[in-house]
Amino acid sequence: MFRKRKFEQELDEELRSYIELLAEERVRRGMSLEDALREVRRELGGMDRVKENVRDLRPGVFLETLGQDVRYTFRALRRNRAFAFVVLLTLALGIGANTAMFTVVDGVVLKPLAYPDSDRLLTLWERSRSDGLESTVSPANFYDWREQSRSFSKMAAIDSYPDFILNGSAESQRLSGADVTAGFFPLLGARMELGRDFLAEEDRPGRNQVVILSYGAWQRYFGGRADIVGWVLTLNNAPYTVVGVLPRDFAFVSKASDYHGRNQFDIFRPMALPVPLPAWLRGTHPLCVLAQMKTRGRASPPSRFSSARWLMSAARS
């Protein structure tokens, strides 16, 4: 690429010497010099053709050809600017779409979950015996699974339906909330930024007047106060004591058709289901259930538990 002129000069000299050698051989056989040169050139097929064949074999010819194509393309696009705009727009859309798809695939399928032992995390679903459809889980079935399962070391559930109105300030604030069972945060390996996790005895009716704040809610609604643990908040006109704040990087990922389109919450409360459970709690299905296998099985589940299809079948009453 950078010694093209010298290369051409050397090529001309080599071809000239080669032709002269062949012509001298024919002169020794009795031909005239002019006839010998004419015959040699005819056999070679023309000097330009020989040069092109040699050029095609030299190093760097691909880059040179590419450069010529690029220059020709830019000249053509400069002459037709409307067409050039369409081409650039098409390239931008194509590159953007591919980048977005790869980002989604990398984030959902390829990239491991940001939880300890994420290859052992599963979501459990119900499957109806009548129509075979999958759904989230009823509280009664979750309790049965947790008591009777031998395959899982931990099991917890989350209900994303609760919302909270934060009272006591100049203007009430609506906080997105979730109810979780005891052991939910240890299952995901979450350690509190401040305070502590829920206690087992707080996951009972009448003793669940405690909450854990997300890091974002702590910063947004309470200014990141260091003494937030122990505060009593008025939520839905009832008092709740803040016992902990989640770390900045904690994110709950769930994709049961994006689990009602919600996967980030401002505030968490113990679920506190009654024991024994009323019969009607087997007919409702609000829970997303997570579990951790005791040991790695023969076939590891998908890296994203949002796409896991490991099902625990249960009849709907």
Image (cartoon, rainbow, N blue to C red):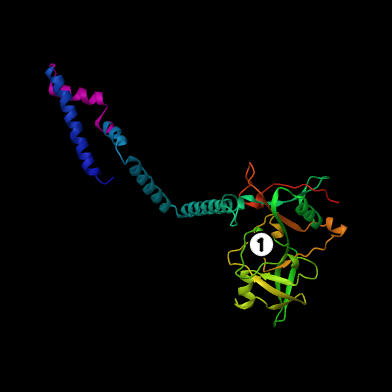
> Does dot 1 land on a helix, a strand or a loop?
helix
Q: Indicate left or right for 255 with 72 as reference.
A: right
Start and end of the magenta stretch? Answer: 29-49
Q: Is residue 263 left or right of residue 284?
A: left
Q: Position of residue 154 (x, y in %)?
A: 69, 55
Q: Residue at x 40, y 51 (%)?
A: 74
Q: Dominant secondary structure of the magenta stretch?
A: helix
The residue sitting at 77% across, 55% down in the picture is 142
Question: Relative to the observer, which residue lies in front, 79 or 180?
Answer: 180
Horizontal and vertical percent for residue 3? 24, 44
Q: Which residue is mark 1?
A: 185
Residue type at mark 1?
Phe
In the rendered view of the protein, which quadrant contains the N terminus?
top left
Looking at the rendering, which quadrant does residue 130 occupy? Answer: top right
The location of residue 101, given as percent across then percent down, is: 57, 51
Residue 160 position, x and y percent, is 73, 62
Q: Is residue 240 above or below residue 295?
A: below
Question: On the picture, is 141 further left or further right than 3?
Answer: right
> Magenta stretch: residue 148 in it?
no
Q: Nearer the viewer, residue 34 or 298?
A: 298
Residue 199, above or below 241: above
Q: What residue sits 25% from the left and 43% below the top? A: 4
**Number of other residues with Cα within 10 Å of mark 1, as a class: few under 14, some 14 to 19, many 20 or more:** some
* Residue 262 seen in the figure: no
Residue 187 relative to residue 22: left or right: right
**Of all residues shown, which one is farthest toward the bottom?**
170
Q: Residue furthest top?
A: 29
Q: Is residue 304 above or below residue 250?
A: above
